[in-house]
Image (cartoon, rainbow, N blue to C red):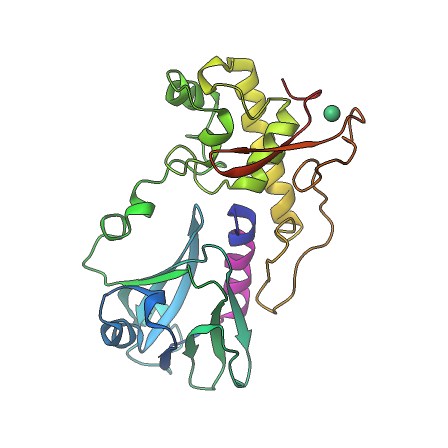
Amino acid sequence: MPELPEVETVRRGLEQKLNNFIIKKVEVCRDSTVAFPLNKEEFIKGLLNSLIYKWDRRGKYLIAQLKEVQNENAQYLEANSKNNGFLVVHLRMTGYFKFIENSSHPCKHTRIRFFDKNNNELRYIDVRSFGQMWWINKDLSLNKIIKGLGSLGPEPFSKDFDANYLKKVISKRTKSIKAILLDQTIVAGIGNIYADESLYSAGISPFREARTIKKNELIKLKESIVTVLKKSIGSGGTTFSDFRDLDGENGNFGLQTNVYRRTGKECHKCGNLIEKQKITGRSTHWCPKCQK
Ligand SMILES: [Zn+2]
């Protein structure tokens, strides 16, 4: 599943590729990809003539700010346009975007297609089809309609996410620290890969009861999370094996994982073998010697 670094990589790609992209046509190839409004015609109609003005990310959600274009030939499009709400996307397991100049025949996993007047296409492809899109008009509240977005914890890079915050939220939690890191209401954007890698880097066992983790360990954990995520963003969200960027490339270069999917291989620090076990249904990789 794409995690924060992959979604951030997609966001940057969208920002780069979609220069003054005004939606002139929308084709919904699979109705269930549209999460809101429930009527897909309303979704399509709402998006037409929208300038995709800015892409933001919150946790694993991509959020496009839309402007309603009144005069396409105006010199400063955004200044001449009214707010037209948001297009929100969650890629879930296998969703990805592809930007295609001079649109071509879509593959069978294509779910939604956006076109501009020059027939450039922003195509959303999703093999397993768990991904979702919302068009939220300007009078509605994003956080109320998209529950998962409204309940997100702080961004790992924000000032709100520090050792004091962690100490406070986990002080009574008997769950494992791994399960805590996967909980999007505690911290936004971390999934299985980066939870395992951050815990390794901080030297903390994923099985530790969250409340037993000391302040100095939490300081280290916070630093590890930020470092691991930043490193991955820097190399284009590389650790996710099925991940594709906007050119349809698998960005799997550069960054190596220390524990994730390295079961039975030697730990880079101590030479001990990396182990794997499930925690709340998720495969967890760790070094029993380096992580206590
Ligand atoms: Zn080790």
Residue 184 to residue 26: above or below: above
Residue 227: x percent and y percent? 62, 35
Q: Magenta residues?
A: 8-20
Q: Is residue 185 left or right of residue 6?
A: left
Residue 64 located within the stretch drawn in magenta: no
Residue 274: x percent and y percent? 71, 31
Q: Residue at left 55%, top 62%?
A: 13
- Looking at the rendering, the quadrant in which ligand 1 lies is top right
Please tell me whether the stretch drawn in magenta is mainly helix, strand or loop: helix
Residue 14 located within the stretch drawn in magenta: yes
Residue 259 to residue 108: above or below: above
Q: Is any atom of residue 148 visible in this view? A: yes
Residue 231 to residue 125: above or below: above
Identify the image quadrant of the C terminus: top right
Residue 203: x percent and y percent? 64, 22
Tell which residue pokes out farthest to the left in this image: 139
Tell which of 275 and 169 is nearer to you.
275
Q: Is residue 251 left or right of residue 64?
A: right
Q: What is the quadrant of residue 264 in the picture?
A: top right
Residue 66: x percent and y percent? 33, 66
Q: Is any atom of residue 20 visible in this view? A: no
Q: Is residue 69 left or right of residue 6?
A: left
Q: What is the quadrant of residue 70 in the picture?
A: bottom left
